[in-house]
Image (cartoon, rainbow, N blue to C red):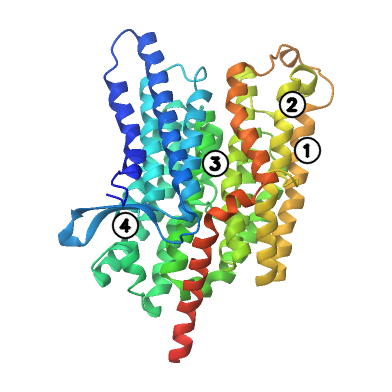
Amino acid sequence: MNAAGFPLLSLLTFLPLAGVLAILAIRGDEATVASNARWTALWTSLIVFVLSLILWVRFDPRVADAQFVEQATWLPEFGVNYHMGVDGISMLFVLLSTLLTPICILASWEAVQNRVREYMIAFLVLETMMVGMFCALDLIIFYVFFEGVLIPMFLIIGVWGGQRRVYAAFKFFLYTLLGSVLMLLAVLALWYRAGTTDIAGLMDNPVPVSWQYWMFLAFFASFAVKVPMWPVHTWLPDAHVEAPTAGSVILAGVLLKMGGYGFLRFSIPLFPDAAAFFAPLMFALSVVAVIYTSCVAFAQDDMKKLIAYSSVAHMGIVTIGLFTFNQQGISGAIFQMLSHGIVSGALFLCVGVLYDRVHSREIARYGGVAKIMPAYALVFMLFTMASVALPGTAGFPGEFLVITGAWRANGWVALGAAMGMILGAGYMLWLYRRVIFSKVTKAEVRALLDLSPRELAIFAPLILLTLWMGLYPSSFTHVWEASVAALIERHEAALAIPRMAGL
């Protein structure tokens, strides 16, 4: 129970499961069940979003430590407790998860017509896992939510995906699960040594340097796949292409942030010496990801696959920022994760709008869409500009801060990150030109209808956030400044101890 006496985080985390129970209780014919399941899921997710807004309003950004802390005995004989809380680093990721869930449900309103009850249940369970993961302050609790995300996402891709959905679902599941097995072994090793899996307790019981390298690599095996980093990124394009539109939105918007969040929450603070030692490797892999996947994006003829490769490049910018170990780089990485969650999710929704009308994602099937769907062209242009980091949009502050932080750490790394911005502008503008401009030559394009009121309602909050984050970034960065400063201070102090001791 937190200091206020109200378990707000637990309510946020588990309220979607109440929606699941309500959906399971629905009776009637297929159409009635589908309609009631949609509305139940939507209202449940909207209530959770409102609760997360209350959490944001009551959050004190001046405090670096966890707030709204809840703790209860779970497995006392093993030193494992139910321990939840949020700090400046995790606060906005909770908000991102609760925002995108109702948007995904709305986006699926007409697109998903079979097994609607099960689909809505999968999304609500997924929301519980995402929120719980960002709130967990115990490694075992974190691991349960972290891996629990895989089950509903596996079903969303495998049941409601495209023609190769089973292949993509199993590839996604196996890649992400196998890496996490090593992480679980590392968690057990930490528990064996410290007698607890509480994150604060582990922080107070520093891991020996000789252990840190192996522990870092074990956690890296899990987080690198989740980011995903090159060369373990190959599951992502297949998953995005085969997933339904809403699945791609939540995959790009939240699930890709799990790896970056894991590096920030565990790898850097728990294994500071190993993090510093492996930073050059992280820089190298990230720069390769930024440049290589940007070049691969140019060769794509599928809109979803192009945006999927762009996501790998953008997340490469994130991992560069995280391992600069300075305020600009880490703040930029967090900002980039949040902005990418909004912008990339919106781009997948833009692709979904066309797919719902033409049932094709091939770039060559379109052309001249601006003449038929002017409102859509304007919305797509905004998110394209945000993706290429146009100043005044959400994509710019994060990339600017990361490049600034990278310059302080290594000028060549900053140059590699900047190359990603240049290449990103190239492939995104190439995509926009081929789809939106040129002549209308196809009858199916002439028959397109512009954005419906439901689609405008989906895009409206994403447009607002894209402009808000671009024009007033300090309203977001101040949330995590204190927590990031404390993280850097602990990291530098931990690195100084071996040198002082002559070890």
Give the residue type that dot 3 points to.
Answer: Ala
Which numbered marker is on residue 377?
A: 2
Q: Residue at x 45, y 65 (%)?
A: 267
Cα–Cα gap, marks 4 and 2? 46 Å
Residue 491's place in the image compared with 72, above or below, is below
Cα–Cα gap, marks 3 and 1? 21 Å
Disc 4 marks which residue? 138
Residue 254's place in the image compared with 288, above or below, is above
Counting residues from the start of the chain, the first of labels 1 and 4 encountered is 4
Marks 1 and 2: in contact by CB < 8 Å? no
Q: Is residue 253 left or right of residue 130?
A: right
Give the residue type that dot 2 points to.
Answer: Ala
Marks 2 and 4: in contact by CB < 8 Å? no
Q: Secondary structure at mark 3?
A: helix
| Residue in front for this viewpoint, 371 or 360 | 371
Which numbered marker is on residue 252?
A: 3
**Residue 301 image-quadrant placement:** top right
Crowd around label 2: few <14 · some 14–19 · many ≥20 (10 Å)? many
Cα–Cα gap, marks 4 and 3? 25 Å
Give the residue type that dot 1 points to.
Answer: Trp
Marks 1 and 3: in contact by CB < 8 Å? no
Q: Is residue 111 left or right of residue 368?
A: left
Residue most extreme to the left = 77
Residue 24's place in the image compared with 446, above or below, is below
| Residue in front for this viewpoint, 268 or 356 | 268
**Residue 454 image-quadrant placement:** top right
Disc 1 marks which residue? 430
